[in-house]
Image (tube, rainbow, N blue to C red):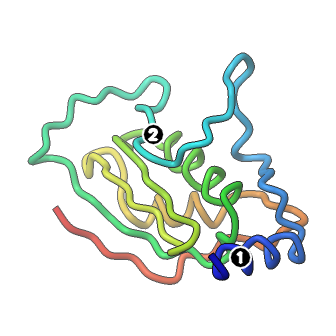
Amino acid sequence: MRALAAALLLGSMLGCDGSSRAAAPASGEAAQPSTKAAPVPNGASNSATSSEVQRATLTIEGMVCQGCAEAAKQTLSRIDGVVSVETDFQAGTAMVAFDPSKTNVDALAAAIEGVDRDPAPAFRVTARTERQ
C-alpha cells in the first residue's frame, strides 16, 4: 500500500496526470480503466496462430501511475501486429504479444519512447525480454 501511495505521490510531483497526446481514445470510445488484454488494433487481424505469436516484456522507466500504464497500453495496442498488451505500473512493465512478421521489439520500444507526455517525463525502455 505504501508503494502505491509513493508512486501516486511521485506521479503528481512529476506532473503525471495520466494524459498523453498519443493515448487519447477515439471519439465515442470510453477510456478503459483496466490494463489487461487490449483489443486488436483497428485494421489488424488476429489471424496469427499461437505458434506465430511472440511475447516480449518491456521494462519502462517513467510509468508511475495508472494513467501512465494506460497511455503505454493504448500506444502499443495501436501497432499493427500487436495481439494483446498487459501493463503494470507498479512493476513498470508492459507484456506484449505480437506477430513477428508485422512488428518487432525494437518497434515496440520506439513507440513507447515516442509517446508525448508533456509535462510528465518521457518513457524510456530500460530492458527487453523476448520469448515465444
Left or right: residue 35 versus residue 54 is right
Give the percent coordinates (x, y) of residue 26. Answer: 69, 26
How many numbered discs, if any? Answer: 2
Give the percent coordinates (x, y) of residue 130. Answer: 27, 70
* Foreground residue among 105 and 88: 88
Choose the circle earlier in sequence order: 1 or 2: 1
The amino acid sitting under disc 2 is Ala
* Residue beneath disc 2: 38
Q: Is residue 63 above or below residue 80?
A: below
User: Which quarter of the figure is the N terminus placed in?
Assistant: bottom right
The amino acid sitting under disc 1 is Ala
Identity of the residue drawn at 44% across and 23% down: 43
Left or right: residue 4 versus residue 80 is right
Give the percent coordinates (x, y) of residue 68. Answer: 68, 60
Crowding near the residue tagged with mark 1, few <14, some 14–19, many ≥20 C-alpha atoms within 10 Å: some
Discs 1/2, front: 1
Q: Secondary structure at mark 1?
A: helix
Crowding near the residue tagged with mark 2, few <14, some 14–19, many ≥20 C-alpha atoms within 10 Å: many
Q: Residue furthest top?
A: 28
- Mark 1 to mark 2: distance in Å? 24 Å
Q: Secondary structure at mark 2?
A: loop
Q: In the drawing, what numbered circle is on residue 7?
A: 1
Q: Quadrant of residue 32?
A: top right
Left or right: residue 80 versus residue 45 is right
Give the percent coordinates (x, y) of residue 54. Answer: 23, 56
Q: Residue furthest front?
A: 1
Identity of the residue drawn at 33% across and 64% down: 56
Q: Is residue 122 above or below residue 73?
A: below
Identity of the residue drawn at 48% across and 69% down: 93
